Every structure is written in structure tokens, then in C-alpha cells.
Amino acid sequence: MNQAQSSRTTNLNVADRPFEIGLYSFAELTPDPATGAMTSPAERIANLMEAVELADQVGLDVFGLGEHHRHEFVSSAPAVILAAIAARTKRIRLSSAVTVLSSDDPVRVFQQFASLDLVSGGRAEIMAGRGSFIESFPLFGYDLNDYNALFEEKLELLAKLREAETISWSGDHRPALEDQGIYPRPLQNPLPVWVAVGGTPESVVRAASYGLPMALAIIGGMPERFAPFIDLYRRAATEFGFDPAALPVSINSHGFVADDAQQAADDYYPSATVMMNRIGRERGWPPSSRAQLETGKELRGADFVGSPGQIIEKILFQHEIFRHNRFLIQLGVGTIEHPKVMRAIELLGTEVAPVVRKEIAARTGSA
């Protein structure tokens, strides 16, 4: 299976493509930390669609939408929302971020995103991961004791679905397929699939073993400590028979952009503090103050919070470490006023992205 994939992935020449900058969102439905006001689910989705439409207009490359099955989010069915966004955009690539593959059916995931690919004119991607929450497992009848086995088996099936119209396959967690046709087929051949990892060696090697692009989430800590995972990915890809220069890597992080650094911090950290402490209570983390979290906005921190110039500096700083091909930012953790989010997207597309692309092109000699 891996050698069949290799014949396609190694011809992508991704190292010669322009550096990509984009957004991802979990479509949070949380109160404004200053006023306590809540938007309705319909308004939240309307704002999201407006935001991605602007991202497309200002030249950003990618938008990813996460999958969650909790009351704080409205994106339990990303492919549906992405299809609506496809009708309002022209060039931006549309991805999940992530598809919780362990608790889904790879056949249905493939069909949904192949359909999105047709609707969007060849702009769909799947970012497959195990997810950061567990609600989908009992919701869809899966045992958390099978957490790792489910993802491994379903990623294997998803990879195979990209390669042939008719497949035979068997596993432990899904009924077998015997000479089954899988339709529709996407415009892109193969349909792009990224593997999202949070920084474990096993996840990194798994992505490399399939010759699939890797998206590494860095949402805490110094970026330098993640460099060994990128190195491991590229070494493992070589050992599995893939050309690492042809396999793109994305860095996905939290942050916010405003006209000046203080405004960015004032916009970002109130809601981020509330949201991260809410999650922390569930997971047994000690509470964090805004002052503690603000250390992340320093050059060697994880958060991309600041003025356009500071965001440019930080992306380029991390590019020296990772030599990655794509950067995605979640603009806000929790709720930030919609006009401020729109301004952040404008700044990212018109001031940050052109400078970053030009500098990285000069470094790498890419188009």
C-alpha cells in the first residue's frame, strides 16, 4: 500500500510551492468574556462564513474547521459547513482541522470530502486526527480502550480509499469491504489527506509511514522542543521509501493579530484564559492567569499574538527551525468580537502573508 502511495506523493514537488498561510477554527460558541453576551448558533456560523469569505478575498491559502461534539462549539459536521463556504469562496483551500477519524467511518469521511472537492472545484482536504476531546466515542458507540487501534485501522482504510475506486479491505472495527465501489471520486487525485499530530513520536512515525503530510499542533512550550518531531518525521519518511522533500509540514498554533501588540494581547488573552482554564479544570491542570499565559507571545513562545510585524518575525523564526511549508493560526481561543476577527484576517492577508511568502521564497528558491 505504501509503495503505491509513494508513486503519487513523491511527485508533488511541494518544496517548490509558495509558503501557505491560513486559518483554522473550532467555531466556538462561548460568551464574550467582557460582556457575557452569547451569539446564537446561526449567527456564529454566519460570522464564520463571512470571515472565511474575507480570508479568500485577502489571499489567504487555507481554512480548516475542527470537529467537536460539545455545547461550546457548533462544528460537529465540518464538511457541511465547508460546503456552504465553498459556494462563497473562489480559491482558498478547505480542510477539516481535524476530522476525528477514530470515531467516524472512513468511507463516509472520504465520500463527504470527495463531494466537497467536487463542490469547491478541487479545493478540499482532510486533516485526520484523534481529536482533543472524547465525546464522540460514546456518542457513536466506540470504546475508549480502542483509542489507538481505531485510529490506526481507520487511517489505513482512508489511505486505501484514495488509491482505488473499488477496494477490498478487512479490519477489526468496521465491516469488511469486498470489491466495493467508493463514490463519488474527487477532482483531486488523490484527495489530499494530512495527519494531525500533537507531538508524540508514535503519531509522527505513523504519518511518515503512509507518506502523508503532517500537521503539528504547537499550543504550548518553546518551539525548539518540537524540532525533533519534524526531524523524526523526515527520517522516518525516508526509511519508509518516501522523499521527505516532497512531504509538506504544517505548524498549527493559537494567536491573534491587531494593529498594535497591546491591542492584540487585550483582544486575545481574556477569552483564551477563560477557555484554557475551563479545559484545564476538566483535565486536572492548575489554573493559569493572564500574566502566565502572556509569556506565550514572546518570540520563543507558542502563541502568535501581536502586531503584523511581530507575527512576521515569529513565523520566520519558526521557519528557521522547522523549514515547514504551511502555517495555520487559530484566531482566538474562545470568543472575540467579530469586527476584531475580521480586522485580524485583513492584517494577516494583506500585511503578514505577502512579507512571509517573499522572505521564505528568497530563502528556499521556491516559486
Image: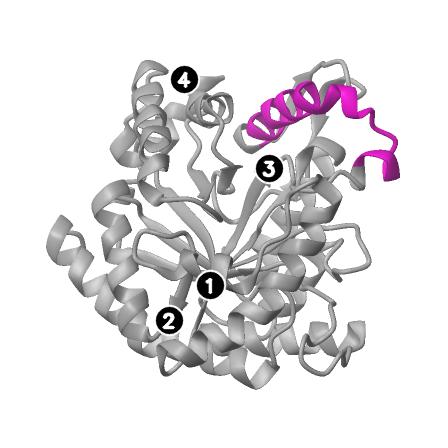
Looking at this view, is 344 or 286 the one in front? 286
Q: Amino acid at mark 4?
A: Gln
Does the magenta portion include 150?
Answer: yes
Q: Residue furthest bottom?
A: 339
Secondary-structure class at tag 2: strand
Give the residues in magenta: 137-161
- Residue beneath disc 4: 3
Q: Amino acid at mark 3?
A: Gly
Q: Residue at x 39, y 61 (%)?
A: 297
**Horizontal and vertical percent for residue 353?**
31, 68
- Residue beneath disc 3: 129
Which comes before the other along the chain, label 3 or label 2? 3
Q: Which is in the foreground here, disc 3 or disc 1? A: 1
Q: Residue at x 31, y 51 (%)?
A: 300
- Residue beneath disc 1: 255
**Horizontal and vertical percent for residue 118?**
59, 55
Q: Amino acid at mark 2?
A: Gly
Q: Amino acid at mark 1?
A: Gly
Mark 3 surroundings: few (<14), some (14-19) or many (≥20) residues within 10 A: many
